[in-house]
Amino acid sequence: MTTSSTVLRVLRDRDARRYLTGLVVNAFGSSALWLASGIWVKDLTGSNGLAGLCLLALWAPTLAGPALGTLADRVRRKPLIITVNLALAALLLTLFTVDSPARLWLLFAVLFLYGTADAVTGAAESALVAAVVPADLLGDFNGLRMTVTEGMKLVAPLTGAGLYAAFGGPAVAALDAASFAATAGLCALLRVREERPVPPGGDWRRRTAEGVRYLWRHDGLRPLVRAGGTTLLLTSLASAALYAVIDRLGHSPAYAGVLYAVQGAGSVTVGLLTGPALRRLGARRFAAAGTALTGLAVIARAVPSDPVALASSLASGIGLPCVLTAAFTAVQRQTPDALLGRVSATASTLMFTPNVIGLAAGAALVELAGPGLLLPCYGLAMVATAVPLVQRAASASRTAARSPSDANPA
């Protein structure tokens, strides 16, 4: 099946089309606010450190992802997503009162609740997608999802910055609130029947542990999630050296926008190819190929050349989404519905938390050594991360090729 035919098949499905539209709207509003919040804090305080705390406030709730994901397994996912989106739309309107440094606590509180809600809805959405989209199209849908969300990252930050410059932070908050309300409306139109979940036994900690144990004991999911977390850790370490790379190229810091745009273009492209590639290669080989390509891109970034830097950004944009999409698609396909919210949230935490750790550690390391030394080390470690995935895929192929008599000689 060709890429165009699978994309058309996904888009012909009314529920899948509505779901993707909701993701586009939501990603646009969220990306605009994430950028504008830092500018907002910088304008009110003049502090780079406080501006950087905006990102921390958004990411911090990810650490509690496995516990937050249990909520997505206790209630029906569609009403949960609608309720949380409408609550966020109302919450964002409180930012109209943030007009001085004394009221910045409200902005940080909203961002923290924003991140918490994102962890809950992320788990619920992963489970709802598995119910809405046919199993054979999950890879294609997740690839398209990557395409539309990355595409919004190319457009929304500029829109948010322009809107902030013209009308201030409250205007960006209003835009994001409208995007959440629209997402809730589109979700309400989905035709999906959900049975009321049977309340799981045990307390909150026990239910959370069930999701963690299932993921870590699953021989098919554990290697993919571990590779995703390692890849993001090494990628974030390399990202911390970005401005040192730009200095070696002789450009101003604004050149980072060019490199990010090229990287985003690569992610948009690979999203369209994800479904066919997953079917042809399998999840492990697809993830291994993406991780290895990202590692080679990081190594190439150490070369002080503009064409090489641009090619490296493009290759990184193509490679990095592969391991993430492969892991999340495998989770959706291989997890029982009753556990899917918790397992999805646990996978997100294990893969995205290293990103925060890597940014902090990378900022310290780049002060001790230059990108010419650090980037090849990070890239080689990434290539090494891909090797076990290929070996496991080859081992699984050999096992599947054995005859029944090989497994039971008697």
Image (tube, helix red, strand yellow):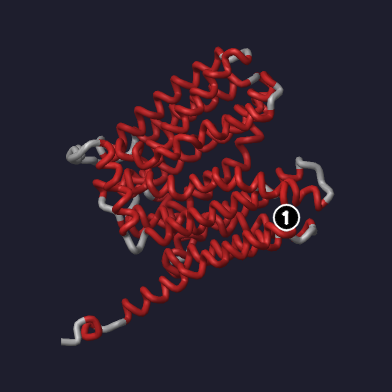
**Residue linked to disc 1:** 371
Count of numbered circles on the image: 1
In the displayed structure, would residue 385 be above or below residue 266?
A: below
Q: Position of residue 209 (x, y in %)?
A: 29, 45
Describe the element under mark 1 as helix, strand or loop.
helix
The amino acid marked with disc number 1 is Pro
Instruction: Tell me the quarter of the picture where residue 180 sits.
Output: top left
In the displayed structure, would residue 250 be above or below residue 165?
A: below
- Say which quadrant the C terminus sits in: bottom left
Q: Nearer the viewer, residue 26 or 237?
A: 237
Mark 1 neighbour class, 10 Å CA radius: few under 14, some 14 to 19, many 20 or more: many
Instruction: Tell me the quarter of the picture where residue 364 sits.
Output: top right
Q: Residue at x 41, y 53 (%)?
A: 328
Q: Residue at x 42, y 76 (%)?
A: 394
In the displayed structure, would residue 199 be above or below residue 131?
A: above
Q: Nearer the viewer, residue 409 or 358?
A: 358
Q: Position of residue 344 (x, y in %)?
A: 37, 47
**Res. 270 visible in picture:** yes
Using residue 310 as the reference point, say whether residue 140 is left or right of it.
left
Q: Position of residue 66 (x, y in %)?
A: 36, 42
Using residue 208 as the reference point, say whether residue 394 is left or right of it.
right
**Res. 14 visible in picture:** no
- Say which quadrant the N terminus sits in: bottom left
| Residue extending farthest left | 410
Q: Position of residue 389 (x, y in %)?
A: 46, 67
Q: Residue at x 72, y 47 (%)?
A: 367
Q: Residue at x 53, y 54 (%)?
A: 321
| Residue extending farthest right | 250
